[in-house]
Structures are given as structure tokens and as C-alpha cells.
Image (cartoon, rainbow, N blue to C red):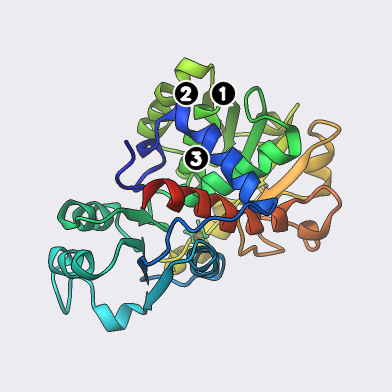
Amino acid sequence: MLNHFLKFSDIASGEIQPLLERAVELKAGATSTALAGKSVVIFFEKPSLRTKLSFWVGIEKLGGNPVHFAPEEVGLGKREPVADVANVMSRMSDAAVIRTFEQSTVEEFAAAASIPVINALTDAEHPCQALADTQTILEQLGSVSGANVAFIGDGNNVAVSLGYAVAGLGGHLTFASPDGYTVHQESLDGANAYGVAVGGSVKQVINPQEAVANADIVYTDVWTSMGQEAETAKRLKAFEGYQVNPELLDQAGPNVKFMHDLPAHPGEEISDGLLYDSRSVAFDQAENRLWAQAALMEKLI
Ligand code: NVA
């Protein structure tokens, strides 16, 4: 039983595929009033375009009422303790969608809340992104099971959640990251354990060319995530040679698709124009945030 969605593995691996199929149905025009009469708090401590828009519109599509707070209004953990905010929101709303820095903050919030809590990105995970990502892979390939996915770049929040999602659906994900920026062993072990029953797997390599060989999907994310801005110069240097560009895609499978969770930094992790390459499905992926999260909210709230 899914109470909160704080990290990708909160959903049982057997529940992912039905949820994605529901997302596809909603995208195709199925309607739902699952949130009629319900209010959902959207509270973000970091910038957001896709996540805020897709939750806001998704809540409305399901007949619910979105209530948005900017960080300075709430002062989470500063103006008021995290647990007190969670208690108050639980008394007056039906779910909370939270974007913050530390994973421990959403966990502390959820521990004190009596409503479902959804992680809309922390430094550790971006599980809603991974739902939209696997919906996109399902649409493109017909199945995530057996798919070969290459993630090139930083072993960050997006990479970790994607690893769980692909492995949990029986796909194979190879991360290629420079030394010092690889996915932590604990997450690699966790994703492999999560996917073992369905034959899914993840692995970490250093070389991008090795990762993309035979890939059906090549995925990348920014080199400097929100909150890491002070490390930008150091990261630009560390990630030299990790840019995804047409030449790298040419080394993948013949029908390879390119994915990016956006926002992108052309000239850094991707070459100029790559989002508009005929192999890019990045904007389908962005739209799928709406449908995957609607399916999630239907199930959770
Ligand atoms: N890794 C990026 C994802 C942005 C949607 C970040 O955390 O900033």
C-alpha cells in the first residue's frame, strides 16, 4: 500500500507498470474526478517549471484544488518546525507535494503528516521524474523490460530515481560518470535489489562510449544541480568529455532516442540544438510529467 512517494522504491515494483498504463490512458483522454473536493498543497523550496505546472494542472484535471506556497511564506524549519507545518497542512488539505534540499526533510515531514506526501525533488531523488521517464520509454519502445538505457553525466537525484524505475520494470541502465560523480554504491545495490525479481539491472561505468553501445535510450541531466551553483566551474571541468551530442548518439543503437529531464544547458551536458534533434523525445518526456503524476495522485490520494 503506497502511503507516500518519497523515494522511487516506495512503490512496489509490480505497481509501476499498471500506473504507467493508467498514465497513458489519461493522456489518451480518459477522465477522472479522483480529487473532487480535495485540496493539494504544492510547496517548493527550489525553482520549478515542469513540476509545478504539471502538478497544478494535474490536480485541476482530476477535479481537485491546488494550493501553492512559495518558500518564504512557509519558512520550513525556520519560521516553523517541519513537523508543525506538516501537522497544519494535514488538518486542512488532502496531500502535500514538496520540493526541498535534504531527503531527510521530506521524510521528517511525512513522519509527522497524516496525508500523503509526494517528493517533487530532493538532492537525493526525483521519483516523479522517473515515472514520466519510464512512461516515455514505454511509449517509445513498447516496453521498459529489456530496454538498454544509458545515463551520461552526474550520478545525481535524477539518475538514482531513474535507476530504480528502469530496473524495477526489468530494463538495464548503465550510468557513465567521471570519478567522484558516480552513483553511490548504496543506490546501485538498492536498484539492483529492487529490480532483481523482474530481471532488471543497473551498473556504473566511467566511459560514455561504453555506456551508449547498443543503447535504445541515451539520457542526460545537468552537470550542476540546483543548490550546487558554487561548484559550477569545478563541475564543468570534471564533466569534460561527457557531453551528449549527435556523434555520441551515432554510437548507440540505430533507433536510439535521446532524453533529458530539462532544463538543459546546451554547450554543457548537450550540444546546441540536441533537444530538437529528430532523435530527441525530451518534450514528450516533459509532457508526461502531467500524466504520470495524475496517475500517481489517483492512486495515492
Ligand atoms: N538534477 C537537477 C534536476 C532538475 C529538474 C537538479 O536537481 O537541479
Q: Amino acid at mark 3?
A: Asp
Q: Amino acid at mark 1?
A: Gly
Q: What's the CA distance linking mark 2 and mark 3?
A: 25 Å
**Label 1 Cα crowd, 10 Å radius (few <14 / some 14-19 / many 20+):** many
Q: What's the CA distance linking mark 2 and mark 1?
A: 6 Å
Query: In the figure, is residue 218 to the left or right of 80?
Result: right
Q: Is residue 12 above or below residue 92?
A: above
**Label 2 Cα crowd, 10 Å radius (few <14 / some 14-19 / many 20+):** many
The residue under label 1 is 170
Label 2 CB less than 8 angstroms from ligand 1: no
Q: Is residue 128 above or below residue 79?
A: above
- Going from N to C along the chain, the mark reached first, 1 or 3, is 1
Question: Residue 263 at what x, y percent from top left?
Answer: 61, 64
Query: In the figure, is residue 127 to the left or right of 243?
Result: left
Q: Is residue 186 above or below residue 233?
A: above
The residue under label 2 is 195
Label at residue 39: none
- Going from N to C along the chain, the mark reached first, 2 or 3, is 3
Q: Residue at x 63, y 53 (%)?
A: 288
- Going from N to C along the chain, the mark reached first, 2 or 1, is 1
Q: Are marks 2 and 1 in contact (CB under 8 Å)?
A: yes
Query: In the figure, is residue 3 to the left or right of 259?
Result: left
The residue under label 3 is 179
Question: Residue 233 at what x, y percent from top left?
Answer: 53, 65
**Label 3 Cα crowd, 10 Å radius (few <14 / some 14-19 / many 20+):** few
